Image (spheres, rainbow, N blue to C red):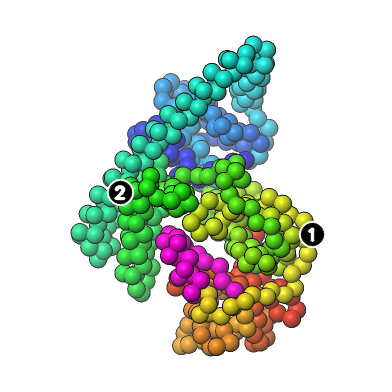
């Protein structure tokens, strides 16, 4: 099934009233008879009449059908059902489609077949060209409409950020959660979910503990930089333009990546995986490094509900193959387009595997990509240590990086201590500018994974 997020569903709302009404219906208390199949979800919602409304959603397009009298599309019932699925897909039992759902889906399939048959039988080359031109114009119109809404969102967000900084961060820290959610929702309405994420990032920094002022100022600065760059998008180099559009929330299709990206053939070692699950949509980051090119590759995957991740990329293995980077001023995210000769990687050799060298690499990367949130690092001859109540990861020169609190306070720390026996090891980690989170470790016994690589 498709991976649905709350922001993606909310963006489908035809207006603010429908969005609010749909959110009010996104509760299992409002529904009976919910179910899911390989192609659809459905449910019954009691309205003002005697019979409940029958709501069904084809997840493929998506397409919506509801027995309510609303003329809005999608109606609040369809929005509510899809929002509920985005939040609690595990509560939708996989079962056979009831007749009123199957008939609708089959009717849609037959209608598409008839259209295809008529197209094959009747369309002349001239008509086909005209249809293609019309489709291109419609696509361009949709793109123009979205970009107009995004520009409006940029203007609104800029005004909000100016007001925020004029009031001061200390005052804004006392704003209600509803106020932060309001401006984030406005950015989703403007079809700029990336800006909504940045707004929430400022709010999160406000409550991040000691030195929150530094993190909140940095988050606000990143948002300001994105808004400023978005206004100058047409004058920026194409690779940086891709980064700005990604920061705003535009997606690059795999087809575009394969057409525009740069392929690299190498022996790729899987040096780390991280799974983050928010109960609606799980995301997995897989880090690859090329043994000859020393290029990094970041493979991002998403899974909804109980959907499993692909198991072909395992930490501690290496393969000969080709990856293609997404167009970017800092090529990191990549697609694996060819993989062969997979084998265990019992060792990991990494030149310049010192703390100083890795921080220089991070500084250079940050200069190319100001919105960089995580940077892969590899330390040779690394040891765990303590300074007061803080755990550190030190190199052979005794230069050290503080560990992320979630790692330092969890079982992975003790797994790392046990597997290394206090001896130096090669360690891969993610660095966020403040703390490191170890991902995997190579000792004489081979590779030890330090982060969960499957869904809990």
How many neighbours does mark 2 have within 10 angstroms: few (below 14), some (14-19), or many (20 or more)? many
How many neighbours does mark 1 have within 10 angstroms: few (below 14), some (14-19), or many (20 or more)? few
Q: Return the x and y of residue 403 as percentages of the image width and height.
A: 51, 76
Up-down relation of residue 3 to residue 176 (above or below):
above
Can residue 415 be seen here? The reply is no
N-term-proximal mark, 2 vs 1: 2
**Which residue shows up at 73% across the image and 65% down it?**
317
Q: Left or right of 322: which side holds 43?
A: left
**Which residue shows up at 56% across the image and 68% down it?**
376
Q: Return the x and y of residue 70 as percentages of the image width and height.
A: 41, 23
The N terminus sits in image quarter: top right
Label number found at residue 419: none
Task: Say what secondary structure mark 2 lies in.
Answer: helix
Label number found at residue 157: 2
Judging depth in this view, the residue of 129 and 57 nearest the camera is 129
**Which residue shows up at 60% across the image and 63% down it?**
296
Q: Return the x and y of residue 421 as percentages of the image width and height.
A: 67, 86
Q: How many labels does the image show?
A: 2
Residue bearing the label numbered 1: 341
Q: Return the x and y of residue 191 as percentages of the image width and height.
A: 40, 41
Up-down relation of residue 148 to residue 172 (above or below):
above
Q: Does the magenta stretch include residue 234?
A: no
Pair 2/1: label in front? 1
Look at the image and give the residue range highlighted in magenta.
359-378
Q: Which residue lies furthest to the top in this view?
A: 122
């Amino acid at each position: 099934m498709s991976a649905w997020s709350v922001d993606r569903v909310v963006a489908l709302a035809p207006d603010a009233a429908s969005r609010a009404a749909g959110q009010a219906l996104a509760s299992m208390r409002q529904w009976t008879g919910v179910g899911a199949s390989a192609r659809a979800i459905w449910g019954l919602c009691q309205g003002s009449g005697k019979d409940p409304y029958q709501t069904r959603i084809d997840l493929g397009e998506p397409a919506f059908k509801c027995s309510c009298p609303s003329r809005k599309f999608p109606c609040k019932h369809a929005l509510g059902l899809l929002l509920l699925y985005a939040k609690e897909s595990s509560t939708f039992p996989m079962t056979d489609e009831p007749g009123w759902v199957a008939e609708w889906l089959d009717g849609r399939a037959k209608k598409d077949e008839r259209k295809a048959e008529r197209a094959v039988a009747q369309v002349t080359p001239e008509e086909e060209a005209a249809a293609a031109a019309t489709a291109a114009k419609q696509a361009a119109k949709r793109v123009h409409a979205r970009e107009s809404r995004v520009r409006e969102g940029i203007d609104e967000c800029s005004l909000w950020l100016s007001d925020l900084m004029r009031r001061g961060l200390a005052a804004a820290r006392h704003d209600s959660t509803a106020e932060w959610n309001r401006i984030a929702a406005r950015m989703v309405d403007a079809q700029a979910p990336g800006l909504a994420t940045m707004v929430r990032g400022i709010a999160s920094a406000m409550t991040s503990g000691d030195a929150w002022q530094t993190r909140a100022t940095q988050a606000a600065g990143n948002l300001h930089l994105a808004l400023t760059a978005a206004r100058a998008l047409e004058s920026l180099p194409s690779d940086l333009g891709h980064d700005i559009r990604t920061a705003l929330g535009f997606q690059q299709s795999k087809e575009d990546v394969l057409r525009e990206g740069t392929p690299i053939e190498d022996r790729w070692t899987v040096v780390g995986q991280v799974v983050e699950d928010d109960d609606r949509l799980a995301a997995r980051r897989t880090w690859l490094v090329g043994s000859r090119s020393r290029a990094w590759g970041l493979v991002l995957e998403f899974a909804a509900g109980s959907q499993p991740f692909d198991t072909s990329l395992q930490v501690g293995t290496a393969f000969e193959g080709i990856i293609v980077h997404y167009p970017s001023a800092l090529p990191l995210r990549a697609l694996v387009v060819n993989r062969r000769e997979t084998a265990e990687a019992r060792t990991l050799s990494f030149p310049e595997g010192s703390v100083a060298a890795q921080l220089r690499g991070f500084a250079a990367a940050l200069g190319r990509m100001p919105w960089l949130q995580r940077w892969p690092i590899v330390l040779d001859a690394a040891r765990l240590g303590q300074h007061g109540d803080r755990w550190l990861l030190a190199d052979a020169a005794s230069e050290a990086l503080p560990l992320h609190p979630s790692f330092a306070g969890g079982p992975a720390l003790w797994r790392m201590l046990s597997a290394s026996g206090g001896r130096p090891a090669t360690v891969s980690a993610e660095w966020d500018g403040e703390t490191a989170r170890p991902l995997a470790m190579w000792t004489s016994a081979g590779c030890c994974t330090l982060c969960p690589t499957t869904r809990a």
